[in-house]
Image (cartoon, grey):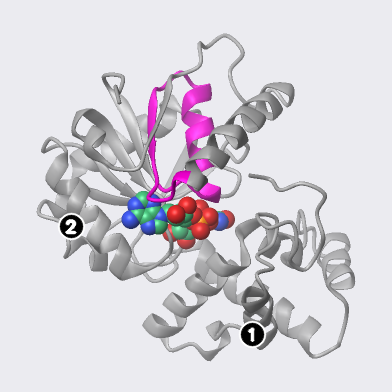
Amino acid sequence: MTTAAMHLTVLGAGVMGTSITTLALGHGLPVELVDVDEEKLTKARAAIERQLRMAQLMAALPADVRRGELVTSVDSEGAAGSVAVIEAITEDAGLKAKVLAEVAAAVRPGTPLITNTSSIPIAELATAVPRPEELIGTHFMNPPYLITTVEVIRGPQTGDRTLASVRSLLTELGRQAIVVRDAPGFVTSRVLHPMINDAIRIVHDGTASAEDVDALMQGCLGHPTGPLRTADLIGLDNLADSLWVLLQRTGDEGCRPCPLLLDLIERGDLGRKTGRGFYHYEESLQ
Ligand code: NAD
């Protein structure tokens, strides 16, 4: 495997890693995309081609920039030469801590380690890395190549240099950073995920169908897609993982995943990524 110099390393070729890679390639940045699952990498390569075409059609990526080179790998050895690492693996604190510790040992000191977690406090993950001042959180919204605002989470130990590097990386990617302090779920997940859980509970209790909940939230309250469609877009497994993180760290019972959410996950209906969740989809977004 050869990796372009000064590339970005993205860990995890799921919903977010794939789409963050599209964003970076579309802005001319070379990317090494890493996943432990070779099949995920094969799917991601095809998804990135589709997303790049869609983003160009929607004028969501600069037209005059030469696309960055993509390299995929099942190990993160190539991270040694990267300008920054974006970790976008499964929302599991233990797994993220292990992977961040491994990659921190591989990169040059001074390389920003960016965790794209939905809810896990940065301070918690910082205990796993040797240079906690280099760890910072980003919370790209799905899909990152279309949504231009990014929540950036500054952990208590995150250094000024790391924050400045991440701000400049996001500017290079045409994103606006909103920097917030560290807390379970930060701002967006702390507000959005319990709200979606409530919407699922309404469907579970038979008060209204998913379509009607979404139609009301869109038509009356100006929500762009409706909470159930948003849940499908996030991925129901990822939503439940984030709700467990919130429940365990805040004690807020509103964050306990609704049984209907857990039933859908049990059936393998994970939303857009499997073609079925609260709705059915002709093609997967990935
Ligand atoms: P996903 O389940 O679609 O993908 C996770 C990927 O990580 C999988 O491909 C898996 O094979 C890979 N992985 C697991 N262990 C790995 C390891 N040790 N090394 C490399 N790859 C590994 O999840 P996702 O929806 O892409 O979420 C990724 C992260 O982004 C999570 O922390 C999630 O909370 C966060 N996030 C998700 C959304 C969203 O809308 N889905 C939005 C913002 C943030």
Asked if 167 appears above or below 247 in the picture, the reply is: above
Is residue 235 toward the left or the right of residue 133 in the image?
right
Work out whether residue 231 or residue 163 is closer to the camera in this orientation and state it: 231
> Of label 1 and label 2, which has the lower sequence position?
2
Residue 148 horizontal/vertical position (percent): 57, 38
Check disc 1 and report the residue beneath it: 258
Element marked by disc 2: loop
Q: In which quarter of the image is the N terminus?
A: top left
In the rendered structure, which amino acid carries the disc numbered 1?
Answer: Cys
Which residue, as the protein is rendered here, is positioned at the far front?
A: 39
Residue at x 88% of width, y 65% of height = 215
Mark yes or no: residue 153 visible.
no
Asked if 57 appears above or below 264 in the picture, the reply is: above
Q: Is residue 182 magenta?
A: no
For the residues labelled 1 and 2, say whether their Cβ atoms are less than 8 Å apart. Answer: no
Callout 2: few (<14), some (14-19), or many (20+) C-alpha neighbours within 10 Å?
some
Check disc 2 and report the residue beneath it: 157
Q: Which of marks 1 and 2 is in front?
A: 1
Question: Which residues lie in the magenta part?
Answer: 12-38
Q: Is residue 28 magenta?
A: yes
Residue 17 horizontal/vertical position (percent): 47, 44
Residue at x 55% of width, y 49% of height = 15
Mark yes or no: residue 21 visible.
yes
